[in-house]
């Protein structure tokens, strides 16, 4: 790369991106002063880290974006790393959003929700939103949610559903909801119950037991024996939850504990979530081919990417040691700490363990990270897949391909088709990067309403796949390292021909995975089948991949994932068709009225939950037609409200 003119680079905060000859982003960085930071890349090569030297060898272009403040640069850097996932950045590849409990105390009758993100601004006393968590297991959060409702019967319906109800729901009839939607529930009694739930979620379970015991004694003294029995059952239930809690920190404190571990295969990081002094959950991450020399950069970038979008930031993040960056103008712990404080409006402190108990938690996080790294390092799937698909003596037409070695398969796109005799036709694509699903990149394609001449190709999987390939080409880069098709040689050829016309067939591997065959020649779809076949272009026989090998099992997992994904989208399309048909069968409901209803509402259940006033807003809907619609809901959905 040519040395840039540093006089033309602004002396402002901002981000910079190095790109290769194909326009792919190799590295995203942040700087307090762009010109000074970028000049450090073009000094004596011996003074640069090895990874930086390798990145500069592939870089051909440099792009900068100025920001008004350093904090804006922080946000932009985290956003661009997540978007482009550059090869030379420390990238947090786990996009999972953790489960949180949410209570809005400003509602007259608050409810307990499980959320993965909070919309509508920051949380805190000002807007009444209280968050509890995070829970790394969504299943555990759901179990806890159900247990809480059995102890404290809060309402479960949404605000919209509550307004539209005309009678109590099933939970009311089984004693797990007071039905504030239709009954005059005492607001003070309900608020007291909400406060008890908050105490439980804050880890103040023992204090809650004491409060309940006092209330039970008072109720007994007033001869309110039924209410005293309810309180007795609540005490027993809370004490049962106490038995399951693992208290690891005295004083009921909230903190995250981070540990690092180096193994032969890479560097791993573990994080423990402690809330109310109890260990709530944990999460582990792994970066192959990194060592302790990369630990400072890894830890700082992890803290930025993980906590920039956190909904429930703890007051403390306890680190194994304080990282110091190599470059003077690079990301530092104090600047990151100040940025997160301002972003989340909380008093956050990032520091070292204060006592032996906290030190043990750091060691526990490191031990978990080491065990996770050991499991992850056993198989290098990208390298194995590269060896599987690389033709002998050939290389891909890529700038980073080396004749001596097969490039790893880092990004996989898989496609499948589903339809019913040509109707509700859907094609779906899923994306995996370095063995992990990228759900934000999954796509669903509908064809019947898009291609005017598609009726002739209904039910033709080859034509559908060819149409999908044309759509995929229009979407453009980034291209996959491997395009996997659920099918056989016919499906493979249909897609290959489309990419070949555009000269893209040598840019990435294309393969099809077909089910194994029984002795009678039929597809063997028994569960646990490990003998599926992989077909590639210009080869009549399937690839010689050992049955049960890690690479074949992973490709089967990718195929099953895209199959389930497209089947779900196809079923949803069929359901919508059926529901549209239900409306058209109602006397007096023509195509124009049916279309107007579907423009106003997303689904038939939404129409069923709508009030008469909302339905009258639809042109053509009068009292008699609303009544007819209600009767149809009773037949189809089994309810009229």
Image (tube, grey):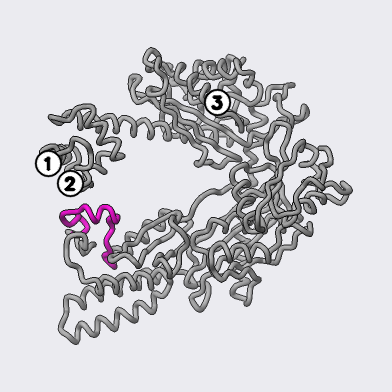
Q: Residue at x 20, y 68 (%)?
A: 185
Whether residue 374 is visible here, answered yes or no, is no
Quadrant in the picture for residue 166: bottom left
Crowd class of label 2 (few under 14; some 14 to 19; many from 20; radius 10 Å): some
Q: Position of residue 355 (x, y in %)?
A: 62, 77
Say which label, 1 or 3, has the lower sequence index.
3
Residue 154 within the magenta-colored segment of the rendering: yes
Does residue 442 appear left or right of residue 239 in this picture? right
Q: Do the residues bearing badges 2 and 1 touch, measured as CB atoms within 8 Å?
A: yes
Say what secondary structure mark 1 lies in: helix
Say what secondary structure mark 3 lies in: helix
Q: Nearer the viewer, residue 196 or 279?
A: 196
Of the two numbered discs 2 and 3 in the rendering, the one whose residue sits closer to the viewer: 2
Name the residue that disc number 3 marks: 474
Q: Where is 7 relative to 253, above or below?
A: above
Please provide the residue range marked out in magenta.
152-172
Image mark for residue 352: none
Image mark for residue 623: 1
Distance of label 2 from label 1 (alpha carbons): 8 Å
Residue 246 within the magenta-colored segment of the rendering: no
Name the residue that disc number 2 marks: 612
């Amino acid at each position: 790369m040519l040395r840039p003119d540093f006089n033309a680079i602004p002396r402002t905060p901002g981000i910079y991106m190095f790109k290769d000859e194909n326009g792919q982003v190799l590295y995203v960085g942040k700087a307090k002063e762009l010109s000074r930071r970028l000049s450090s890349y073009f000094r004596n090569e011996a003074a640069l880290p090895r990874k930086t030297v390798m990145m500069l060898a592939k870089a051909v272009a440099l792009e900068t974006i100025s920001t008004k403040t350093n904090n804006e640069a922080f946000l932009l850097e985290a956003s661009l790393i997540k978007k482009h996932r550059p090869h030379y950045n420390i990238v947090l590849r786990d996009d999972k959003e953790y489960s949180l409990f949410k209570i809005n105390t400003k509602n007259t009758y608050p409810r307990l929700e499980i959320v993965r993100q909070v919309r509508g601004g920051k949380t805190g006393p000002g807007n009444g939103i209280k968050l509890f968590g995070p829970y790394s297991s969504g299943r555990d959060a759901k179990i806890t949610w159900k247990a809480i409702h059995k102890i404290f019967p809060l309402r479960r319906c949404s605000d919209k559903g509550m307004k539209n109800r005309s009678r109590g729901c099933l939970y009311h009839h089984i004693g797990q909801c007071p039905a504030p939607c239709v009954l005059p529930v005492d607001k003070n009694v309900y608020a007291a119950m909400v406060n008890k739930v908050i105490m439980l979620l804050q880890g103040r379970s023992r204090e809650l037991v004491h409060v309940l015991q006092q209330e039970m004694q008072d109720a007994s003294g007033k001869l309110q024996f039924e209410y005293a029995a309810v309180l007795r059952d609540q005490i027993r239930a809370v004490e049962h939850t106490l038995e399951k809690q693992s208290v690891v920190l005295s004083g009921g404190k909230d903190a995250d504990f981070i540990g690092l571990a180096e193994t032969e295969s890479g560097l791993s990081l573990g994080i423990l979530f402690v809330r109310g002094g109890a260990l709530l959950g944990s999460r582990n991450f792994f970066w192959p081919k990194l060592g302790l020399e990369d630990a400072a950069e890894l830890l700082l970038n992890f803290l930025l990417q993980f906590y920039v979008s956190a909904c429930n930031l703890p007051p403390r993040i306890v680190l194994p040691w304080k990282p110091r960056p190599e470059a003077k103008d690079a990301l530092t712990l104090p600047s990151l700490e100040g940025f997160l404080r301002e972003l989340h409006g909380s008093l956050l402190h990032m520091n070292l363990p204060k006592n032996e108990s906290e030190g043990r938690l750091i060691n526990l996080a490191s031990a978990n990270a080491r065990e996770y790294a050991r499991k992850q390092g056993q198989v290098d799937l990208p390298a194995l897949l590269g060896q599987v698909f690389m033709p002998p003596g050939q290389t891909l037409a890529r700038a980073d391909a080396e004749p001596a070695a097969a490039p790893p398969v880092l990004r996989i796109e898989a496609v499948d088709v589903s339809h019913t005799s040509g109707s509700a036709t859907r094609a779906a694509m899923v994306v995996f990067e370095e063995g992990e699903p990228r759900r934000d990149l999954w796509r669903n394609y509908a064809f019947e309403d898009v291609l005017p001449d598609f009726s002739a190709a209904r039910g033709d999987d080859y034509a559908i796949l060819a149409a999908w390939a044309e759509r995929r080409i229009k979407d453009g880069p980034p291209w996959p390292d491997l395009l996997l098709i659920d099918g056989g040689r016919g499906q493979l050829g249909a897609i290959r021909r489309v990419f070949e016309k555009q000269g893209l067939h040598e840019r990435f591997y294309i393969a099809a995975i077909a089910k194994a065959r029984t002795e009678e020649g039929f597809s063997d779809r028994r569960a646990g089948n490990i003998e599926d076949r992989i077909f590639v272009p210009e080869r009549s026989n399937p690839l010689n991949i050992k049955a049960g090998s890690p690479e074949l099992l992973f490709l089967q997992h990718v195929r099953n994932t895209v199959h389930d994904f497209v089947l779900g989208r196809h079923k949803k399309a069929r359901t919508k068709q059926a529901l549209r048909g239900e409306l058209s069968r109602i006397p007096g409901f023509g195509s124009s009225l049916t279309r107007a209803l579907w423009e106003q509402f997303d689904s038939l259940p939404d129409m069923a939950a709508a009030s008469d006033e909302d339905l009258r807003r639809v042109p053509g809907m009068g009292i008699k037609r609303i009544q007819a619609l209600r009767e149809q809901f009773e037949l189809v959905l089994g309810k009229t409200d």
